[in-house]
Image (tube, grey):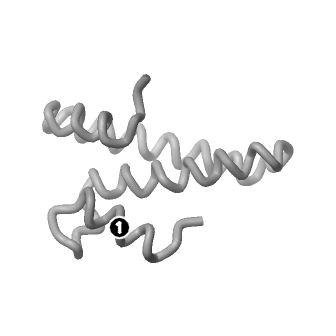
Amino acid sequence: MLTQEKKKEIIENFGESDRDTGSAKVQVALLTARIADLTEHFREHKKDHCSRRGLMKMVGSRRRLLNYIKNNNVHEYRKLLKELNLRK
């Protein structure tokens, strides 16, 4: 689960200002952190299918936001992928 401190740190790193919580870059970064937390949860709780559905919805939402960023600014898209280590 994301704490307020961790959320604030992510917003400061990826947002234009400290109050920028709605930009696509910040939303992708927050979703990536939540996805990482849920992935760790599934290592222990393999049969938690209800939470797995939520994880799949978050992954799809992140994918759509990344497509939006890619269509508007390819340079920012590549920079964001590198910062978040999303592609191997």
Please identify the residue farthest to the right as the structure is shown.
Answer: 47
Quadrant (top left/top right/bottom left/bottom right) for the N terminus:
bottom right
Viewer-nearest residue: 41 or 20: 41
Quadrant (top left/top right/bottom left/bottom right) for the C terminus:
top left
Above-or-below relation of 82 to 46: above
Above-or-below relation of 67 to 12: above
Which residue shows up at 41% across the image and 68% down it?
7
9 displayed left or right of 58: left
Viewer-nearest residue: 36 or 56: 36
Q: Residue 66's image quarter?
A: top left
Which residue shows up at 44% across the image and 68% down it?
6
Query: Residue 22: x and y, percent?
Result: 28, 64
Residue under circle 1?
9
Marker count (numbered)? 1
Query: Residue 40: x and y, percent?
Result: 67, 48
Which residue shows up at 39% across the image and 35% down it?
85
Q: Amino acid at mark 1?
A: Glu
58 displayed left or right of 29: right
Which residue shows up at 26% across the image and 66% down it?
12
Callout 1: SS = helix
72 displayed left or right of 2: left
Query: Residue 4: x and y, percent?
Result: 46, 76
Viewer-nearest residue: 67 or 20: 20
Query: Residue 27: x and y, percent?
Result: 35, 56
Viewer-nearest residue: 11 or 52: 11
83 displayed left or right of 55: left
Q: Residues within 10 Å of mark 1 (few under 14, many from 20)?
A: few
